[in-house]
Image (cartoon, coloured by chain):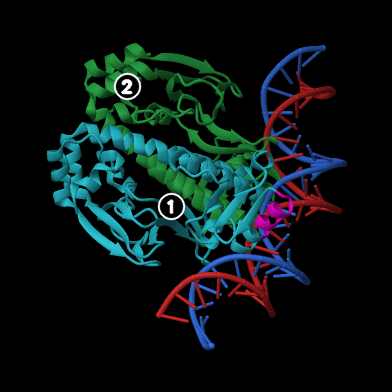
Chain colours: A cyan, B green, C blue, D red
Amino acid sequence: METSILKKVYIFSGLSEEELEDVQKITRTKTFNKGDIIFFDTEPYLGFYITVSGLVKIYKISKDGREHILHLINPYNTFAEVPLFENFGEIREDAFRYPANAMALEDQTKVVLIPARPFTELLAENSRISLKMLSGFAKRLRHLNRHIEEITLKDVTKRVANFVLSEYINKRKTKLDSTHSIRLNISKNDLASYLGTILETLSRTFKKLQEEGIILVEGRTILIKDFEKLKETAS
Amino acid sequence: METSILKKVYIFSGLSEEELEDVQKITRTKTFNKGDIIFFDTEPYLGFYITVSGLVKIYKISKDGREHILHLINPYNTFAEVPLFENFGEIREDAFRYPANAMALEDQTKVVLIPARPFTELLAENSRISLKMLSGFAKRLRHLNRHIEEITLKDVTKRVANFVLSEYINKRKTKLDSTHSIRLNISKNDLASYLGTILETLSRTFKKLQEEGIILVEGRTILIKDFEKLKETAS
DNA sequence: CGTAACCTTGATTAAGATCAATTCTCGTGG
DNA sequence: CCACGAGAATTGATCTTAATCAAGGTTACG
């Protein structure tokens, strides 16, 4: 692993080459294939991870097998940092467990492990990282707030419409692509699980929105036909 | 406002008397009555708050009036700190808004406002506060994760059973009270909204659990009749 | 070209929301 | 001390959404 990768990770941006090397020294890189488990929520906590390539899903499973996806982690984003800080003040029985399950969604998903102990020592010396992490946590909290809001206050149609809309707006920000479409990088099954529903219901909802002339679904590509109506439906 | 109050707030614990006074200087105390709004999610961000007495609910409202409670904030806990850190790196259009609504649930609810600007300056000088805040955020993230898990993967009966159970376990930890009961400090309407359901459904669920001989509901007091069955139901 | 993963569609069911009518509880003023 | 009224809670009848069950179709890929 090279420091050039770490540089692209938000919490390490702004560190000197020396500092980056200090971090780099303690890391361990692992590669996973599609469907491989990175960790279960029952495992002892080793440290947090950075996705370098591929895609990772963070999810929970109920007793009877229903799954819900909490986050999808794209390259250069971190996951499972929460337990690092939970036992600063008091000791909690679940502090040394991973808070959810993590699975690779693509072949050749590379992740970097940052072991907990050495990293906390690094943190104590470098307060800049703390502020970055605070900022990262704030973003995640905001994301979870929105997620809860979506799931508890909106029906499936609104959630789907809103998902397409935000993906589109997000794409416009980053990519130079003038087509009025988005491309899913996950299966519809996973998307359903992320939106708090099941595959069949998602399929029907797509069909309905298509019949209303709002979108056009072709495999993993979704074409937006009527932007205004889409916004309206997302409410 | 006195520094003795601040001392009890997690993120300020461990600060020197001097440091506490620095914080104290920038605070502003406000008192609210039951039902009063502390802030709306449409308001510009002034800073974060500490509950000193009473109870505060943090909630979202949908277009058609449905409400969902995200957090209940007890004395000496903070709320609305997230926006403080969202704009450290990049600028976001919604960074300077409160992320949800806040309402006082009891008369004489006292809160302390910590204005954003002076506080961030204080943060830059005092890295110990950052670590405490990270720990606080970690707790909140864990809480939201659980909350999402509850709402998406469990039915209302399980959620109610689990709520009673955790309240009971929580009580045993803090209070010296050997009765096998809990006392709600919020209305059943608010409890329903917190559990992602509505008053009628909660009422029926309590009735069902009562008929099964698991609990006994008398106003705001819930007596646990069969601890094992309760655990089993909470799954 | 065969098979497994992925997706669609239909029929049915179940959980919980909504609507509506009472009842309970408790604080306040007569 | 009682009566009133408002807010809180209960209960019943009905409706809606989305989950479940089941079958078949499509796509991708070795």
**Of residues A33 and B146, the one drawn nearer to the viewer in this rendering:** A33
Crowding at mark 1 (Cα within 10 Å: few <14, some 14-19, many 20+): some
Residue A185 part of the magenta segment: no
**Of residues B10 and B66, the one drawn nearer to the viewer in this rendering:** B66
Q: Which mark is residue A72?
A: 1
**Of residues A218 and C6, the one drawn nearer to the viewer in this rendering:** A218
- Residue that carries the numbered disc 2 in the rendered image: B120
Chain of the residue that carries numbered disc 1 in the rendered image? A
The amino acid at mark 2 is Thr
Residue B6, percent across and down?
Answer: 33, 22
Q: Is residue B196 left or right of residue A131?
A: right
Q: Quadrant of residue B129?
A: top left
Q: Are marks 1 and 2 on the same chain?
A: no
Residue A209 part of the magenta segment: yes
For discs 1 and 2, the disc positioned in front in the rendered view: 1
Name the residue rendered at 46%, 31% in the picture: B74
Q: Is residue A76 left or right of residue A188?
A: left
Crowding at mark 2 (Cα within 10 Å: few <14, some 14-19, many 20+): some
Question: Does residue C12 sit above or below B7 in this rendering?
Answer: below
Label 2 sits on a secondary structure element that is helix
Question: Does residue B43 sit above or below A15 in this rendering?
Answer: above
Q: Which quarter shows the N terminus of chain A?
A: bottom left
Residue D1, percent across and down?
Answer: 77, 23
Residue B107, percent across and down?
Answer: 56, 21
Q: Main secondary structure of the magenta part?
A: helix
Question: Does residue A109 sit above or below A4 in this rendering?
Answer: below
- Region rendered in magenta: A204-213
On the question of residue B187 being in view, the answer is yes
Name the residue rendered at 40%, 31% in the picture: B86
Chain of the residue that carries numbered disc 2 in the rendered image? B
Measure the C-alpha gap from mark 1 to mark 2.
Answer: 31 Å
